[in-house]
Amino acid sequence: CNALGLGCATTSTIDVLDAKSVELRMAPNPATEAVYFQTGNAFPILDLQLFDMSGKLVKSAVNLKDSNYTLHRGSLSKGMYIVKLRFEQGIVTQKVIFN
């Protein structure tokens, strides 16, 4: 909106959060088949996106609204990925490794 010079009244920003601020625990990492995510009850995970190292979205889960989620590897190749977890308060990003 602002980039096009449309005179937008407001813009929204997304806060980048520290994993500790949402009581995030993830295990195992590195993983072979699945990574388990758990947050404090006051911080339900809304959405999850998994990106490969080139930035390509390879998995996503939306409308979770839960403090627990299991990310299954499925057909993903071995390697490092970036997971982005969205909360009402903002987003948390973490590295995930599948062996």
Image (cartoon, grey):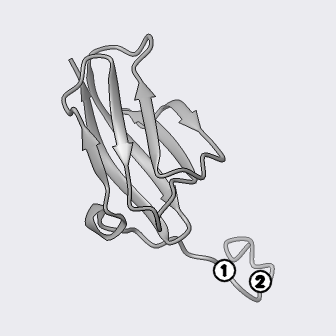
Helix, strand or loop for disc 2? loop
Give the quadrant of the N terminus.
bottom right
Residue hosting label 1? 11
Spot the residue most to the front.
41
Query: Counting other residues with Cα less than 10 Å from the Cα at mark 1, is it few (<14), some (14-19), or many (20 or more)?
Result: few
- Label 1 sits on a secondary structure element that is loop
Residue type (three-letter) at the residue carrying disc 1: Thr
Q: Is residue 13 above or below residue 39?
A: below
Mark 2 vs mark 1: give the one in front: 1
Residue 46 lies, in percent from the top left, at 57, 53
The image shows residue 65, relative to residue 8, as above or below, that is above
In the rendered view, tell whether residue 10 sits above or below residue 20: below
Name the quadrant containing residue 79: top left
Tell me the residue at 29%/61% (across/down).
19
| Viewer-side residue, 43 vs 81 | 43
Which residue is labeled 2 in the image?
Answer: 8
**What amino acid is at disc 2?**
Cys
Nearer-the-camera pick, 45 or 68 = 68
In the displayed structure image, the side of residue 63 where residue 17 appears, left or right: left
In the rendered image of this protein, does residue 68 appear above or below residue 39?
above
Residue 8 percent coordinates (x, y): 77, 83
Q: Are marks 2 and 1 in contact (CB under 8 Å)?
A: yes
Residue that appears at 71% across and 86% down: 10
Q: Residue at x 30, y 67 (%)?
A: 18
Q: What percent of the width, then of the height, locates residue 31?
A: 23, 24
x then y, percent, for residue 75? 44, 10
- Could you classify mark 2 by the number of other residues whose Cα lies within 10 Å: few (under 14), some (14-19), or many (20 or more)? few
